[in-house]
Amino acid sequence: MSTTETIDILDVTAIEPRLKHPTIFEWFDQLSGGEAFIIHNDHDPKPLYYQLLGERGNVFKWEYLEQGPELWEVKISKLTPVEEESIGELVAKDFRKAQVFKKYGIDFCCGGKKSITQVCEEKGLDAATIEEELNALTDSPSVSETDFQSWDLSFLADYIVNIHHKYVREAIPALYEYTAKIARVHGGRHPELIEVAKHFTNVANELEAHMPKEERVLFPFIKQVNEAKQKGEKLDRPAFGTLQNPINMMEMEHEAAGTELEAIRTLTHNYALPEDACATYQVAFAKLQEFEDDLFRHIHLENNILFPKALEMEKEVLK
C-alpha cells in the first residue's frame, strides 16, 4: 500500500468475482490507523460494508464519494486506535449519558465501539461541548437507574428476551398497520410516509429473523459459559468456534436495523408532525419513536454489556 498523500484506488470491477472481497480485505488490513483507500464498483457495495463490520468490527469509516448509477465510489478509512473509553462503555456505566448522545444524533448502541473523538470527527460535532454536557451529568445526583453491569449474565439474557424481544414481537403488528395506513391515506401529500412504511417493514423483517437466532443459539451458549464459570468447569469449543463469530453476525444485524430506523427518523424530521396529521398519524409517530427508544436500549444491553462480558468469560472456560 502506498503511504503517500495520494489515496490508492482499487478498481473492483477488474477483479475476478471470487477474489473481490478477499482483495478488499487484504488492502484494508494493510492500512495503518488514519490511512484510507478508495474502491470503484459498478453497483452499491453495501454488502461489503456489513461483512467488513462483522469480520473486523467498528474500526473503519465508510464514505460514499459517488453513488451510481454507473459508478459507485467509496472511501474506506481505518480508524486510529484511541485509549478513550468508547461511547458504549460510557453509557454502560451511566445510562443517563445516552440522552446526550441521542440529542446529537450519536448512535450509542450500534456505533457504541467508537470514541467521542471519532464520532465528532465523522459528524462535524464539537467534542468539547458534548464532553461538558456529559460531565455535568456525572457531577449531578444520579436518579435510580438499573445496574445492568452487575447482573448475572444468564439473568440478563433472560431479561432481554422477556422484556425487549417480547416488546418487539408485540409492537410490530400494530406498527405494520399504522405505517401502512398513513402511507395509504396521507402518502399523496406526504410521500415520505411511503418510504417510512418500507423502512419499517425492513426493520421488522430483520428483527423477526434475528431474535430467534439469539434465543436458540447465542443466548443458550452464553448461559452455558456462565454456568461453567460459576462451577469452575471447562467447556468444549462449540460448532461455531467461539462466541465472537455469532456475536459479529448479531452486531452486523443490529447495525442493519439501526440504519433503517435512522432513515425513518431522517425522513420524518425527528418525528415532526405536519398540521394535517390525523389521530392515526400521531399515534404512528409516537409508536415509532417508542419502538426506536426501546430498540436502542435493547441493543445497548447486548452490544455494550452482555456480549463483551460473555466474550471475556468465554476465554476462561473454553478448553
Image (cartoon, grey):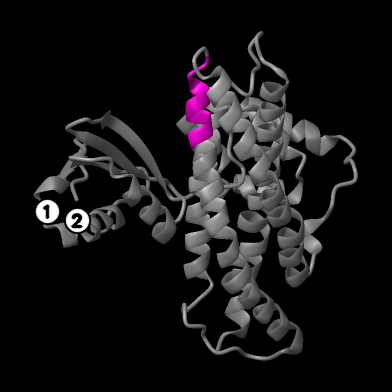
- Residue appearing at x 51%, y 83% in the figure: 238
Give the prevailing secondary structure in the magenta stretch.
helix
Above or below 300: residue 316: below
Whether residue 116 sits left or right of residue 76 in the image: it is: right
Task: Give the distance between the C-alpha atoms of the residues marked 1 and 2, in whole angstroms.
Answer: 6 Å
- Magenta region: 190-198
Above or below 36: residue 193: above
* Mark carried by residue 20: 2
Mark 1: secondary structure: loop
Precedes in sequence: disc 1 or disc 2: 1
- Residue appearing at x 76%, y 46% in the figure: 94
Above or below 266: residue 189: above
* Mark carried by residue 74: none
Does the magenta run of residues contain 276? no
From the top left corner, tell me how far across and down residue 201 is, in percent.
52, 41
Whether residue 238 sits left or right of residue 98 in the image: it is: left
Asked whether residue 71 appears in the rendered view, the answer is yes
From the top left corner, tell me how far across and down residue 78 is, in percent.
36, 47
Q: What residue sits right under mark 1 in the picture?
A: 15
Asked whether residue 114 appears in the rendered view, the answer is no
Q: Amino acid at mark 2?
A: Lys
Tell me if label 1 and label 2 are in contact, CB under 8 Å: yes
